[in-house]
Image (cartoon, coloured by chain):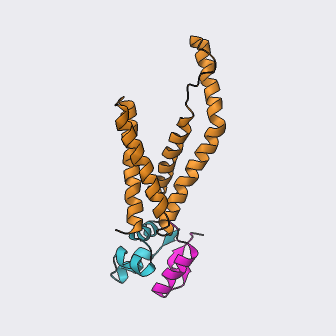
Chain colours: A cyan, B orange
Amino acid sequence: MNNRLKVLRAERDWSQAELAGQLDVSRQAVNAIETGKHDPSLPLAFRIARLFNMPIEEIFDDGL
Amino acid sequence: MTKANIFMNAGWFGLAGLAGSAITSLAHLPDPANLVSSLVIFAACWVMLFTRNADEYTRGLWTSGASLAFATLLILFLGLPFAEGIYDGFQHVANDAPKGTRDIPAMASIFFAVVAFYVGLFWKRLRGGV
């Protein structure tokens, strides 16, 4: 699944560790999501969407 | 150090232990060296067991490794006797070996399951899924 997490994080000038802290996950989890190696669970996807104040589908793209 | 970091580092230690075990076996080093490697592997597994719920990513890594280890055990449960039979078949023809001896030890299943666990874990970590 593609996502815009890295772009959104860069726009806010946050490090992976800072974003991880706000999402209550590990830095490794943020890195894995950004690189597409891990698809976040629905609760985490909602937390991400809420943090960036955007709908989930504007952050994540299933490629269909 | 966070629980996720402990989990990740334990994974590397386990992989190092696995490499050490392979080297000691291939180089025919004394048993204590192999024992130390085995202890590192299983200690790393225990550490990961207790830190796997650090977050959903570490849980996913653990699940990936555990799934592959379980699948390996299931396959070996049925496949190892077949492999033993095939091996014995060839051996008896070639060497007339005595019947009833096991050439492939049952402990091999455990070793392969542990190897499969680390393969599954690191495949998910480096490539994103099995």
Residue A41 picture location, percent across and down: 55, 72
Q: Dividing the image into 4 quarters, which one contains the C terminus of chain B?
A: bottom right
Residue at 38 percent across and 31 percent down: it is B26
Highlighted range, magenta: A38-64
Quadrant for residue B102, please give it.
top right
Report if residue B104 is visible in the image. Answer: yes
Q: Dividing the image into 4 quarters, which one contains the N terminus of chain B?
A: bottom left
Q: From the viewer's perspective, is residue A6 above or below residue B15?
A: below
Residue at 61 percent across and 27 percent down: it is B84
Report if residue B19 is visible in the image. Answer: no
Out of A4 and A49, give the one closest to the viewer. A49
Residue A11 picture location, percent across and down: 36, 82
Quadrant for residue B8, please give it.
bottom left
- In the rendered image, the residue lying farthest to the bottom is A53
- In the visual, does B119 lie left or right of A27? right
Q: From the viewer's perspective, is residue A50 above or below residue B91?
A: below
Q: From the viewer's perspective, is residue A17 above or below residue B58?
A: below
Residue B3 picture location, percent across and down: 41, 67
- In the visual, does B53 lie left or right of B99? left
Residue B17 on the magenta segment: no
Q: From the viewer's perspective, is residue B86 above or below residue B119?
A: above
Residue at 37 percent across and 52 percent down: it is B13
Residue at 56 percent across and 39 percent down: it is B109
